Amino acid sequence: MSRLIVISNRVMVPDGRRKDSAGGLAVAVQSALERMGGIWVGWSGQTVETAPDGLHFKTVGNITYATLDLTEQDYDEYYNGYANRSLWPLMHYRLDLTEFSRQNFSGYHRVNELFAKQIAPLLEPDDIVWIHDYHFLPLASELRKLKCRQKMGFFLHIPWPAREILLALPNHAEIVAALLEFDVIGFQTRGDVLAFLDYVIREAGGTAEPDGTVHVGRQKTKVKHFPISIDTEDFIRLANEAENSTTVNRLMNSIGDRHLILGVDRLDYSKGLLHRMQAFDLFLQTYPDHKRGVTFMQIAPPSREGVPQYQEIRHELEAEAGHINGAHSEFDWIPVRYLNQGYSRKVLAGFYRHSRVGFVTPLRDGMNLVAKEFVAAQSFDDPGVLVLSRFAGAAEEMKGALLVNPYDTEGMAQALNQAIHMPLEERRIRWGLMFDQLIAFDVHRWQQNCIAEIEKFSRAKGR
């Protein structure tokens, strides 16, 4: 049986503690590696003053964890620079926040080359290499330069932009050419696949077959969507365990008989947090009967605090929350609770279980697993309503959600009113449609589909 070699920006190295905080990618990768055996490679999270001395290894069972330190310059140019100031905003349609720097682009390639040189000696002929996310778009190309002919697949966790957006990225042709060195390129949604094919056909002069096989020059690559999911059964367990926990009881005692509207997001300009708060403000103005009857709690732990745009969005949100509370609060009721900190998945599962509305309205998102976690955490007896942005990847699957345009403040306010007033029977029907989808396609099914496609297509190419 082939080994699995996984490369991602960060690695979940076991430390003996229970991993209820692990989600998404970490759960899927861990499961696949336990099944197949192999190596998980990524950045250690540490920076060093001089060039790193190679990979650091830790083996647990049939999995080897291999981490690599980076210099401060590499971290600044590869991670803070090109990955998070060029690729991230551009792929989330924020050209106004996108910075272009040849120095950062050079650092991005330098780190990918560094990883390739460290990984190549570890590879065996029958290995399957599965590379993740925008940090490593050129990694297959760098490995091919080192004569690595293993089966290679790539999965992009964030959106792939429309051709017109991608053309704004200097060196876009070089990025796409490097991606085509993969055997299989996986995206979150059908829309992402269509956007990539549009670039391949109209800009790169390639062709595409009905099954997603693309040809550009001598390159042949399979392009397909694999919507990532959650460990559904495990999240149901967490919600059941947390339902009457001390923390959740404290929250519900403080809420009383009010309806809880809940948002949970990493603090990021792509999540539409400011638009969401403004919609809640308009909701209170337009539907004053809901005053004192609802509480909006937004959990937004900070991230990438070294990037200036993330500092700005934090200040804007704090100001908006203060404005709403100043305008609508009464001596015994505060409408907005804005929490700039994180909570464990178990605690969040308990919060989801008791929420009438899951308010998930990113301006652009690859998938958004919060939407799926919210649905999994609900109970059949009294399920909540998911209000979901149509620009989240999850909108393709979550057919029972109330889909909204996050740029339409009035539309979001109306959706909140509809969600609060929705009859129990309709809530159950909508929730059932989404819950059935999550049971049928969980994160384990996702990783199995991804790896099976890499194996199948690579064999066809004779690698």
Image: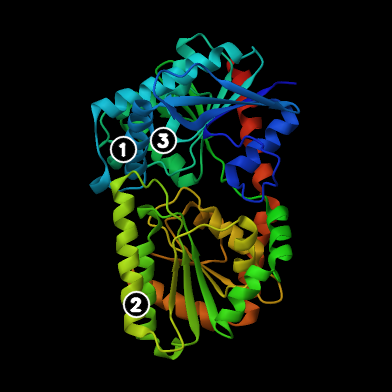
The amino acid pointed to by label 2 is Ile
Where does the N terminus fall, quadrant-wise? top right
Q: Residue at x 54, y 76 (%)?
A: 260
**Which residue has dot 2 on it?**
324
**Which type of secondary structure does the marked residue at label 2 adopt?**
helix
Q: Is 363 or 459 nearer to us in this picture?
A: 363
Left or right placement of residue 196 versus residue 351 in this view: left
Examine the rendering and report whether any part of residue 419 can be seen: yes
At label 1, counting other C-alpha atoms closer than 10 Å, the crowd grade (few under 14, some 14-19, many 20 or more) is: many
Would you name the residue on which mark 3 appears?
Answer: 197
Q: Position of residue 147 (x, y in %)?
A: 51, 8
Q: Residues within 10 Å of mark 3 (few under 14, many from 20)?
A: many
Q: Quadrant of residue 352?
A: bottom right
The residue beneath circle 1 is 86
Residue drawn at x 69%, y 68% as measured from the top left? 245
Measure the C-alpha gap from mark 3 to mark 1. 22 Å
> Is 134 drawn above or below residue 18 in the view shown?
above
Q: Which amino acid, mark 3?
A: Leu
Quarter of image, res 87: top left
